[in-house]
Amino acid sequence: MSALTLRPITGPDELDLFNRLPYVLNSEIATDLDAGRRRLEWLWLALRGDRVVARAGWWSRPGDPHPLLMDVFDVAGDPGDAVELLAAAIPAVTPAGARPPEYLRFVPTDWRTGPRAWMDTLVRAGAEVFVERLRLEWRAGDPVPGDSGRLLFRPMRGPDELIDLMTLVLNGTLDAHSRAGLTRTTAAEAARAQYRDELERYESPHDWWRIATLPGGEPVGFVIPAHNGYNSVIAYIGVVPAHRGHGYVDDVLAAGTRRLAAEGAQRIRANTDVGNTPMAAAFARAGYRTVEHQVDMTWR
């Protein structure tokens, strides 16, 4: 048996080698490199001779110095080789003293009936399932949700208004990542960090964003329609606790969907936790279908 070699790819000319193992993101990796969402030193291979036996890849928002998440991991040989790959690559891409980026994988809706070498190997390497999510999609040609007339919609008056509403929305959230974040920081700090690190950086027009209000002007919630560099998305949606229980989420989601449809979106993507059944039901009522699941894993 050939010796095991563990290394990042040496240049774009090795992308074909990296992509020998099939996965839904393969077609995006070259473009991500050009856009600054990936780096050569974040694309690792385990090789025995010229055979790829495992690979791992990390992703960031454009230009960030460190990866935000690991989103490529495939095993095509001895799982022990893949564990060794992770043991070498994770410290190389993770800043000293930081927690390794979480791993996410897009999977079919029936993924539990198929092979799961990737999951078994990650568990062996010290990871555990954190949450399973629905990947949802509205497509051009589907009915566009109408306006019930119950709420009014306007642009935000400034970042502080949106951040204040995001802070309120975190009270009682069913989102697993948000709930975990609130064990480490306050709702106000979490909302400001999400605005700064994610929402503010969307290059699509921020005047698409809408604050939902009652006819008298009292804010009910908000929706952030955006384009994330891959697809039109409902990036964030929320109803403040004082106005939950009235079905306003349907109106708010409909407004975001109408905005993107009016901009010519051919498809609109969204995500929600499998366990967030109220939000999943709202997307279904708005005509979104589940196209995949997503499994998020963190390191013990």
Image (spheres, rainbow, N blue to C red):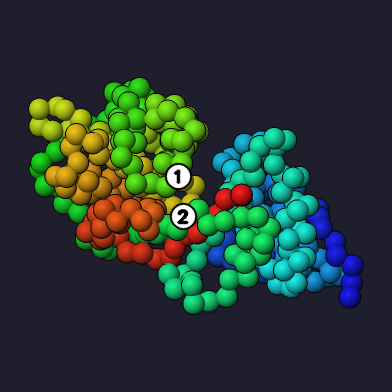
Q: Which residue is mark 1?
A: 177
Drawn side of residue 254 relative to residue 90, left or right: left
- Relative image position of residue 205 (x, y in whole percent): 38, 36
Q: Residue 54 versus residue 19: which sits nearer the camera?
A: 54
Q: Quadrant of the N terminus?
A: bottom right
Nearer to me, 46 or 145: 46
Tell me the distance, in whole angstroms, between the alpha carbons under discs 1 and 2. Answer: 8 Å
Q: Is residue 111 left or right of residue 32?
A: left
At which x and y percent is residue 133? 42, 57
Identify the disc placed on residue 102.
none
Would you say residue 88 is visible in this rendering?
yes
**Image quadrant where residue 244 sits:** top left
Q: Which residue is identified by label 2?
A: 131
Q: Residue at coordinates 35% horizontally, 22% vertically from top-left?
A: 160
Compared to residue 263, the image places residue 240 above or below, namely: above
The answer to whether marks 1 and 2 mark residues whose Cβ atoms lie closer than 8 Å is yes
Left or right, residue 22 beside residue 89? left
Secondary structure under the numbered disc 1 in the rendered image? helix
Q: Residue at x 74, y 45 (%)?
A: 91
Q: Earlier in the sequence, mark 1 or mark 2?
A: 2
Amino acid at pointer 1: His
SS for dot 2? strand
Q: Residue at x 85, y 65 (%)?
A: 4
